[in-house]
Image (cartoon, rainbow, N blue to C red):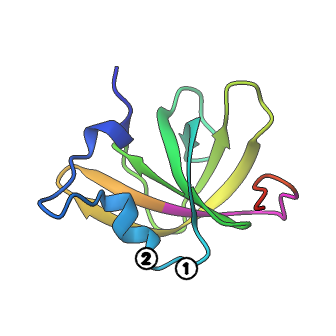
Amino acid sequence: MASASTQLAKDGSGESPVSKLARFFPEATPMRIPVQIAGHGGEAGGEHTTIEYGTSREVLFAASQPLEFAAKIRLRNADGSLDEEAWVVAIQYDGGNAAIAARFVRNVSHWIVKP
């Protein structure tokens, strides 16, 4: 099954909806980290997607499951080295999908390393 990030089509400008949302986060660094998103209190299941941009405090990704502003979500990668809660702080809808920005609930040290 394709992740939400691959399902979100680029528009005529060739820029993805997540890239457009990243304009509001000037410190955002492009990346590709596959994660599972569990919403509404960390319920089982969730959605597989890819973190496309990140800052020291935020992650930006595409989602097809419904998320609301200020919702608490859990982000977890396959090896568990990233397993954190975050609040949804921005949403941009594109058809039935959404570009999401979420801010970590707590300070996550060393999750993103810049040269």
Q: Amino acid at mark 1?
A: Pro
Which residue matches tag 2? 23
Left-right relation of 9 to 39: left
Seen in the image, is 48 located left or right of residue 3?
right
Is the Cβ of the residue at disc 2 closer than 8 Å to that at disc 1? yes
- For label 2, the crowd category at 10 Å Cα-Cα, with few meaning under 14, some 14 to 19 and many 20 or more, is few
In the rendered view of the protein, which quadrant contains the N terminus? top left
Nearer to the camera, 31 or 89: 31
Q: Position of residue 47 (x, y in %)?
A: 47, 33
Q: How far is mark 2 from mark 1, CA to CA?
A: 6 Å
> x%, y% of residue 66?
36, 49
Residue 59 magenta = no
Q: To which quarter of the image does residue 67 belong?
A: bottom left
| Region rendered in magenta | 101-109
Q: Is residue 99 left or right of residue 76?
A: left
- Residue located beneath label 1 in the image: 26
